Amino acid sequence: MLTEQALVIRLNRSDDVVIACQEVPPGIFLPEEGLTVKDAIPAGHKIALRSIPTGQPVRRYNQIIGFATKPISAGEHVHVHNLGVHSFERDYAFCADTKSASYVRPAATFRGIVRPDGRVATRNYIGVLTTVNCSATVAKKISEAFTGDALRDYPNVDGVVAITHTTGCGMDINGEGMEVLRRTLSGYARHVNFGGILIIGLGCEVNQTEDLFSTQRLASGPLLSSMTIQESGGTVGAIRGGIGRIREMLPVANQVTREMVPAGHLIVGLQCGGSDSYSGITANPALGAAVDLLVSHGGTGILSETPEIYGAEHLLTRRAVSPEIGEKLISRIRWWEEYTARERGEMNNNPSPGNKAGGLTTILEKSLGAVAKGGTTNLVDVVQYAEAVTAKGLVFMDTPGYDPVSATGQVAGGANLICFTTGRGSVYGCKPAPSLKLATNSRLYRQMTDDMDINCGEILEGEASIAEVGERIFQLILETASGRQSRSEAHGFGAEEFVPWMLGAVM
């Protein structure tokens, strides 16, 4: 915890840098560090504690975040002009830090919706999914028919939402891209937060509805059906027919009630977007503390964004419950190295410009802060993008770092709630799962109060500890899972943010 007067924070005694808690002008003497600041330092940026020769590693969190690309003197601003990345060996030490799991009894509870198969929902939507971009407008027109007072007789239905995307054709029917798309669509079709699903196709696309159902073993029924525009007489007929199908689902979907259930039924997707240098100091570790609580109550957290754990993956392999789980994670890291090389890119083509403006310099630095969202419990499984998450505890899902794509995979995998940390200001939502926004700093929280659910900046100001804010996040997770609206839900976010990972050539 910091004092209100703190100008800088040192995260570890072995670090080569401190982080500015506010703008620091040149010439300021830092008595605790015994040095004078040489440059104007923006809030969230790094100041060198000692002279660092060219090529030498620079540490934050007592971990390497990059290497000096030119001589750096004590008191100097450390950022993209003098810090870069190159390959170096990391000790994966599989299972070295695993520990015995401990659980809280009795477990915390929330008011959830118990489905016939025993799964528990946090929301109750009807979804209109599309097999292809060509059916997106029809799906949206169908969902628009159920806005306003159209659902007044169905108070237990949270809404009818169109889940559309930009692909589904012009792709290899047997390729990896089609496999991922179908796995993602079937994950949404099966999602516990949907009380009913209508799937709309055009009729001539590569991703045929019949093939989607057969390859993904989806079973048609009163609450899961499909239709195509071409076989429905065109746009008008498809919209009319789709509205009729939804009207048939509504009375059945409305027959739900909330009841007290254990927190072990919660699967929470962990996201960070628009990160800044405070993300790894406040919101991410506070979310990690909440995840530790969730796991101790029998629940599941899904950590993702493989390119944004790059350079910090050794912190996860050490917590793997078996060498096989650790190897699965490293195999995904190697795949990403090959993938970016094949696309003539590099893993350090990240952080984004906004991240860098907020003080993050390299992917290694960003990754070390991002991993903190996963807390400190064992890594119990590693799954592919949009693969169903069945293990209890901390699970890693292989996804891109782009937030909408990553969260789409998490929801397809079964996440029934999302927690999203942000330092620059993200406004993301992802129906059918509610999304909570955690601000890393108080300035952002004040500036975007209507979009932020929790202010983690109090940690930086010494008003609360990481553990205290983690407890608040955990309690808000339970309240939101029980039906309390998140800020993004209040604004109507979530219908446009379905973005499946697109792999392979567009033909």
Image: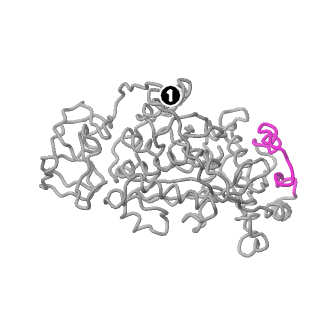
Residue at the image position 53 percent from the left and 42 percent from the top: 304
Q: Amino acid at mark 1?
A: Ile
Residue furthest to the front? 105
Answer whether residue 243 is visible to the viewer in this image.
no
Q: Nearer the viewer, residue 482 or 171?
A: 482
Magenta region: which residues? 206-232
Reading the image, the residue beneath label 1 is 330
Residue at the image position 34 percent from the left and 53 percent from the top: 357
- Seen in the picture, residue 358 relative to 375 is either above or below; the reply is below
| Res 460 → quadrant | bottom left
**In screen coordinates, is 186 left or right of 467?**
right
Q: Nearer the viewer, residue 76 or 303?
A: 303
**In screen coordinates, is 172 left or right of 359?**
right
Q: Quadrant of the C terminus?
A: top right
Answer whether residue 108 is visible to the viewer in this image.
yes
Q: Quadrant of the N terminus?
A: bottom left
Q: Position of residue 209 (x, y in %)?
A: 80, 45
Residue at the image position 42 percent from the left and 62 percent from the top: 455
Answer whether residue 269 is magenta in the image: no
